[in-house]
Image (cartoon, grey):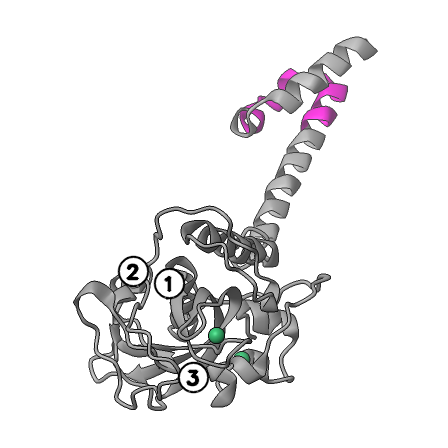
Amino acid sequence: MADANEQFGAALRRMDRHDLNRLTIHAYTRVQRRMIDEERVRRRRAVEEEVAEEAAGAISFTTAALLDLINTMAILRMNRGRDGNSTTNQIEGNFSGNNSGENQFSEPAAPVTPNAQPPVKKKKPCKKNKKAIKKSYLFPEYHHLVAEEVEDIVFKSSTADGTRYDETNLVGSLRCSSCGNRWTTGIVATAIRGYEQQNGQLGYSAEVFNQRCAKCDSLGHLTLDVDTYVERVARRLLIWKGEFSPKRQIDRKFTPPQHRTDLCEGCAVDRCPKGRPARSAFDSHFGLYN
Ligand SMILES: [Zn+2]
Ligand SMILES: [Zn+2]
């Protein structure tokens, strides 16, 4: 009898949840009825737990582990994507790129002008994606990608203060405009601004700050990782629109990479989350806020 009940129990556990709920309870012995009840309760709890877990953001794409992975993947991708063997700058946890390949990222290539003063005028997007070396950039060319993630937004070519403001860090690889030194970082300071529009749309801009070479202090050519740009800008806009609520991340052991504030153009104008001690290093690094 014990054996039969064991088999019965095993069959219950294998049974589809809906079939289990449809069983005609009075057709079974008392022991079996109890087993059916217990199995039903167990399944219900499992479902509730799953829902609770989801609500807690366990599978949300903002989880710390996933963000960590995204950053790491982006950095690896960037290093793989660029040809080069001259990776000598070791700030901010970069990896050395050692194989050549097609550069899959649109680089704001520009004539190399050592120690040139960056132009004061705001850059204009132009064909071929060429950008002069500047202290900060806007990327209207990626607006269509952000707009795939967030409805009713419009890109504004502005770095003036709006009605909303926040900062994040992006992933980028840089090449010194003067000495050719290369480095990759997950701490590209970025200021995201929101501008309320008359028509109910949300205007926004994302100002991405350049960095300086640790060897010669010249500004770098910035190649931005587009995926992290789109993901983080979209997330901020969704939060502002009330369509996304970030969950506080669980504390976890994390050693943030070093950030050279003296080389960061975001820090230079107090727009870099890494430049402020108020936020935790973890939040700053991953661009998480609460
Ligand atoms: Zn340099
Ligand atoms: Zn900075």
Q: Position of residue 68 (x, y in %)?
A: 58, 57
Tell me if residue 11 can be seen: yes
Label 1 is placed on what type of residue? Val
Q: Secondary structure at mark 3?
A: strand
Which quarter of the rendering shows the C terminus?
bottom right
Q: For the residue carrying disc 1, how many other residues have a C-alpha within 10 Å: few (<14), some (14-19), or many (20+)? A: some
Q: For the residue carrying disc 2, how many other residues have a C-alpha within 10 Å: few (<14), some (14-19), or many (20+)? A: some
Q: Please, is residue 52 above or below residue 269 in the view? A: above
Label 2 is placed on what type of residue? Leu
Magenta part of the protein: which range? Answer: 20-36
Label whose residue precedes the other's in the sequence (1 or 3): 3
Numbered circle sitting on residue 114:
none
Label whose residue precedes the other's in the sequence (2 or 3): 2
Left or right of 200? Residue 116 is right
Q: Select label 1 or label 3 by which is in front.
A: 1
According to the picture, the residue beneath numbered tag 1 turns out to be 230
According to the picture, the residue beneath numbered tag 2 turns out to be 145
Q: Position of residue 128 (x, y in %)?
A: 20, 64
* Residue 282 on the magenta segment: no
Tell me if residue 61 can be seen: no
Of all residues, the one furthest to the right in this rendering is: 2
Report if the CB atoms under discs 1 and 2 are less than 8 Å apart: yes
According to the picture, the residue beneath numbered tag 3 turns out to be 165
Residue at position x 58%, y 70% in the image: 285
Q: Secondary structure at mark 2?
A: helix
Label 3 is placed on what type of residue? Tyr
Report if the CB atoms under discs 1 and 3 are less than 8 Å apart: no
Main secondary structure type of the part rendered in magenta: helix
User: In whole angstroms, how far apart are the C-alphas of marks 1 and 2?
Assistant: 6 Å
Q: Please, is residue 72 above or below residue 255 in the view? A: above
